[in-house]
Amino acid sequence: MGALMSLSFWRGKRVLLTGHTGFKGAWAALWLESLGAKVTGLALAPATPLFILLLNGARIRHFNCDLRRPPQVAAALQNENFDVVLHMAAQSLVRRSVRIPQETYDVNLMGTLNLLACLSKLQRPPAVTLVITSDKVYRNAERGQPFSENDALGGDDPYSASKACVELAVQSWRSSVLPAGSGRLATARAGNVIGGGDLSEDRLIPDLIRALQHQRPMVLRYPEASRPWLYVLDALSGYLTYGEALATAGRTVPDSLNFGPAEATCVSTAALIESMQCALKCRLPILIEPSSGVAEKSSLVLNAELARASLGWQPRLTLDEAVEWSAQWYLAWLAGLDVRRIALEQIAAYSERLA
């Protein structure tokens, strides 16, 4: 088993974080800043208020940048040097990807390639570049078996397929484009991340929060679909532990890792909403949406044994705790309280579990 996450590793590190205006990205930026990292963020303007709520007053350099535009990326990175790059920027919504398939491929695949090309031209390329993909990169025939890192890649919808393409592009770049002796280039696969602040469209808990705001029934799709739910700080601790190991443990660390909960934590969407309603102390009617033609898989489970063996990583929160921590954030937000403080308190409490 490898070393656990060392919070001191990130102190003073120059980190480039793409997608820092999104859900996981904003939490990552806040955590990295609290660890003493020097964070530079590249992202589009925030689509939800989370970036402002969490990062107002944070010491983070922000570049409003579209990764589909190489000149914008090159200009933002000009004369910069980074120790670690965490690439989280993406079009990450399955149903939206069906509506805008070409844009989804353009953002996810070409955006990644544009970033890698610009990084390769820096005077001192980063020691680590970690590309965040998805648990949906695997060819899913719905056999119910957990996916391991060596399983076949695939994707029936544009989002899943675009992320599988990113995996192949990174593998190819690492094998044939990246100069020998260069820094590590790797991918991290996780998904179905929950936590306070996610307000994206067509996502389970955000849909419940919007229904609660407007006191209307919640519309639920695929109530029996089972997913590997993971709290946002559990996912991010995986990414940060992985990034640290890639920088310090040489070539012994795998090039791709899954991050997910134990199989017992994979519950249905209906069960998760039941737990979340209890935590929020609400009882909204649930309407089941008829099939819309966007066929999502009924079962998805990751095998994260390799991350446990090579990094010593494992989720620190049970699913019940993940639901409670998520509800705490949303209730504070709905009450107009200081959610940045709530987030920092959760980061501190979570960090104690890493000791």
Image (tube, rainbow, N blue to C red):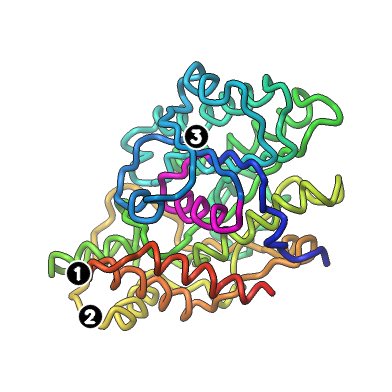
Residue, disc 1: 212
Q: Position of residue 220 (x, y in %)?
A: 27, 65
The earlier-in-sequence mark between 3 and 1 is: 3
Mark 2 touches mark 1? (CB < 8 Å): yes
Q: Decide whether residue 26 is among the magenta residues.
A: yes
Mark number displayed over residue 193 = none
| In the foreground, 159 or 59 | 59
Element at label 1: helix
Under mark 3, the amino acid is Asn
Q: Residues within 10 Å of mark 2 (few under 14, many from 20)?
A: few
Q: Position of residue 80 (x, y in %)?
A: 62, 27
Q: Position of residue 306 (x, y in %)?
A: 75, 61
The earlier-in-sequence mark between 2 and 1 is: 1
The residue that appears at 37% across and 80% down in the rendered structure is: 275
Residue, disc 3: 108
Q: Residues within 10 Å of mark 3 (few under 14, many from 20)?
A: many
The earlier-in-sequence mark between 3 and 2 is: 3
The residue that appears at 35% across and 39% down in the rendered structure is: 98
Residues rendered magenta in the picture: 18-36
Element at label 2: loop
323 left or right, relative to 201: right
**Secondary structure of the magenta portion, mostly?**
helix
